Amino acid sequence: MTTTATRPAPPPRTTTTTRDLTGTTALLRLYLRRDRISLPLWVLLFAVAPSLYVASIEGIYTTQAELARFAAATNASPAQLAMYGPVFGTDIGSVGIWKASAYFTLIAIATILTVVRHTRAEEETGRAELLDSTAIGRFAGLTATLVMTFGACVVTGVLCTAALLARGLPVGGSVAFGVSLALSGAVFASVAAVAAQLSASARIARGIAFAALGTAFALRAVGDAGNGTLSWFSPLGWAIRMRPYADERWWVVTPLLATAVGLTALAYLLANRRDLGAGMIAPRLGPPNAAPALAGPLGLAWRMQRGTLAAWTAGLGLYGLLIGGAAKGVGDQLGDSETIRDLVMRMGGSESLELSFIGYAMVMLGIAGSAYAISAALRLHSEESAARIEPVLAGPVGRIRWAAGHTLFAILGPAVAMTVAGLGAGLAYGAAVGDIGSVLWRILGAALVQLPAIWLLAGVTVALFGLVPRFAPVAWGVLVAFLTVFLVGSVADFPQWALNLEPFSHAPKLPGGEFSATPLLWLTAIAATLIAVGFLAFRRRDLR
């Protein structure tokens, strides 16, 4: 009897050859074409927005004494420090780009989504396997993704620097802020590249990357609100501590760049040691039988949406607490500038500066809640693109019934998150002024009146999914357009018809303004109509 010995599998290669990168240029062109709308949008937004902050500060604080008072009041508020970090100087550059430090976090979100979309999501849907069956190297997809994302970060930094220089700001500070912005995006792009190698699920990979970002933000926020020590353990803290326009610390580039390079190398090492479609972390086996809660499409939607709902609720709730805590000192921060007082009151709708500030902050929370609504509604698009709805619809499940499950979370999910945010802001501000009983419900109402505008964005997403499913992600562009009109329109004197296109301007300006149900009813009716149009169109069209 003859036996045949089994040949052991060869160990993974540890070196990269040019063959492993074959097809990188072709994939780069493909990814650029796929992101031809979203990529330019976030690049231009993050590049131009900091200079707009500077422009608004220039028109409001006209003397050095006002700038110094603003900086002192800001650095004395733990809530403000936790949200944006300290103001390191009293010149127009330091004060003007103080709030723009939030874009270090926002560009990180954009790069995480971009990298996971073109790496792990491509493997999960099977498209990467089809491409790799041709003359495509094993590292081509990862390389093309990182080249595109790192390149977008560099372009963002260069354009941001140019925009700040156009405002007449010093060269050193402008370059420092542009470099900080670019490196913040690059660091978390490399974090996302590592996360994409760890899990076989794009959802879990995004969760890992966002958990890292959340940890970095928490360390930075707690550190800045305290003695600053913890901020040095966060890449976001490093970016802020480059101190643009305030005796720049150029050596901070070293840890940011080293982190990005080190994590990128780790991503390639992990990619070399795993199979295509698999992750370094083996998925756990589920129970042999589904729970009763998964018996219908609503239960399935809950299983898929619950993690996102919990994360957004926690994030908006935390931000609400910070807003409520920061409102008490806003009068000292703004000083005697009548211009900014008039602007805040006009956007907040109250003679009380603190209540106007809270009203303005509730609108910003509503815009953030719209991002969650769009994300929840786009589950319809991702499930169809991945061909996971075909086996579901093959059973006794109607299309509208299936779509209604995810749409319900796009409607009720923001309601839960905004309620938690409103309660957090009301409790924090009520405790600060010593009157929780009368303040809490007014601020909660200010949060809840944002819901019809949020639902309108959800309706836009569902309508796009039903009518033109290929362009459903354009809903993100609609949100960016609304955000731009809200932030810039009042300062840049946009025409009234353009301001009226932005739905959040129609909500009652609570907690200090008068309540009117008419605009809320109109916004709700428009949202319901858009959802109905999307459902009917989805019912009549073919699956993609």
Image (tube, helix red, strand yellow):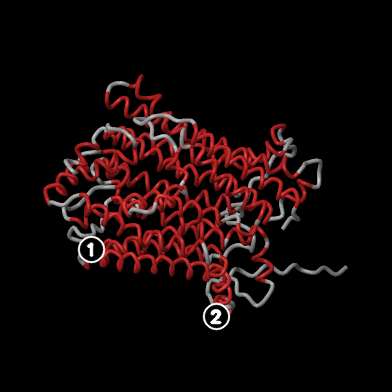
Q: Secondary structure at mark 1?
A: helix
- In the displayed orientation, state which residue is furthest to the top: 437
* Mark 1 surroundings: few (<14), some (14-19) or many (≥20) residues within 10 A: many
Q: Secondary structure at mark 2?
A: helix
Q: Nearer the viewer, residue 237 or 409?
A: 409
Q: Nearer the viewer, residue 307 or 244?
A: 244
Quadrant location, the C terminus: bottom right
Up the image or down, 354 lies above or below 241; here it is above
- Pointer 1 residue: 173
Task: Give how far apart the Cα atoms at labels 1 and 2 are.
Answer: 40 Å
The quadrant holding residue 182 is: bottom left
Which mark, residue 243? none
List x then y, in percent, for residue 303.
63, 39
Residue shown at 69%/33% (left/top)? 293
Q: Nearer the viewer, residue 493 or 457?
A: 493
Disc 1 marks a residue whose amino acid type is Gly
Residue shown at 66%/43% (left/top)? 532
Residue 29 horizontal side relative to residue 60, left or right = right
List x then y, in percent, for residue 168.
21, 65
Residue shown at 34%/38% (left/top)? 348
- Looking at the rendered image, the disc whose residue lies closer to the viewer, 1 or 2, is 1
List x then y, in percent, for residue 57.
24, 52
Disc 2 marks a residue whose amino acid type is Thr
Quadrant location, the N terminus: bottom right
- Pointer 2 residue: 18
Residue shown at 28%/47% (left/top)? 85
Up the image or down, 478 lies above or below 292; here it is below
